[in-house]
Amino acid sequence: MRWKGREQSDNIEDRRGMTPGRMVAGGGIGTLLLVLAVSWLTGTNPLDVLSQLDDQSTFQTGPYVPTAEERELESFVRVTLKSTEIIWTGQFQKAGRTYTLPTLVLFKDRVQTGAGTASAAMGPFYLDSDQKVYIDLGFYSVLRDKLGAKGDFAQAYVIAHEVGHHVQNLLGTLSRIHALQQTADETTRNHLSVRLELQADFYAGVWAHYEQQQFQSLDENDIRSAMDACAAIGDDALQRKFQGSVVPDSFTHGTAEQRTRWFLKGWKTGDINQGDTFTINYRDL
Ligand SMILES: [Zn+2]
């Protein structure tokens, strides 16, 4: 993805110098794979862990001094976020709506969120209550080295997917589905989660479509790189990798094939109206 010298977003909160007070469960990026595995295997939403890690106190550990690599990654994240702001503002305008910009929080190891303390071990996530995307840049090393998704567009896809949840939030989809999940049995809850996640992948693809249209920044390798990321974090791929077998009822994000296909559908059509993952039959998803 051609990104150097492009406009950067200011909607970033750098909390890397701020650490929640008490050492709670979770830990740093080192335990990411373990928690991801546990969360994917059991089908629990990693965000459920938040309430168990709650601790309101935070202390400043001093201004955070990023490494050269982290500075570079931060610029990349800022350019990607800016692009999502431009593109989604335009898409919302076209639909007669207003796009509210999300904030992206950079943190290291642990962070205080609007819903409790979160750990880098949960991977990047979006919180609807405070409209913020949270990411520990260390996740990008995991994505590249442990999950095999190389290339900067794999990293852009991760941001675009989380921003996709923000789009769902603004459109009212998140609250509608979360309400349904409250009273559903576990399998139904998981199915609804898969539908949400595949739609976020679709929105990431829609963003990529307009990123290319407006900035001519992508080539075939970039799309390949995003597809690799979709495939690497498919439930079946993760379960096969970490438990050796696959349990479809416990899926919460969709298979490698589904995630890739919905991303590609967004990429090819650029049409937000084609991303209805809720009314089609679950097995046709
Ligand atoms: Zn997601």
Image (cartoon, rainbow, N blue to C red):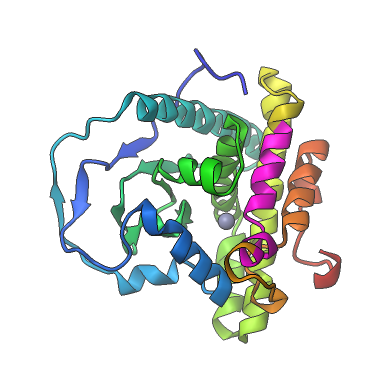
Answer with the quarter of the image where residue 103 lies: top left
Which residue lies at the image location 83% right of the left edge and 66% below the top edge? 280
**Hey, which residue is sitting farthest front in the picture?**
244
Q: Is residue 148 left or right of residue 26?
A: right
Quarter the C terminus occupies: bottom right
Residue closest to the eye, 58 or 95: 58
Residue under the point 68% across and 21% down: 214
| Quadrant assignment, res 253 | bottom right
The main secondary structure of the magenta stretch is helix
Say if 36 sits above or below 6 in the image: below
Report the quarter where the N terminus lies: top right
Residue 71 in the figure: left or right of residue 79: left
Residue 185 image point, x, y percent? 62, 87
Residue 139 in the magenta stretch? The answer is: no
Closer-to-camera residue (148/85): 148
Q: Nearer the viewer, residue 119 or 38?
A: 38
Locate residue 124, reporting x and y percent.
46, 51
Please give the range of residues in magenta. 223-240
Compare residues 94 and 273 and report the one nearer the observer: 273
Residue 79, x across and y down, in percent = 50, 25
Give the residue drawn at x 64%, y 76%: 250
Return the residue found at the far top: 5
Does the rendering let one see residue 99? no
Toward which corner of the image does residue 117 lie, by quadrant? bottom left
Q: Ligand 1 is located in which of the four quadrants?
A: bottom right
Query: Where is residue 70 drawn, in percent x and y?
Result: 37, 30
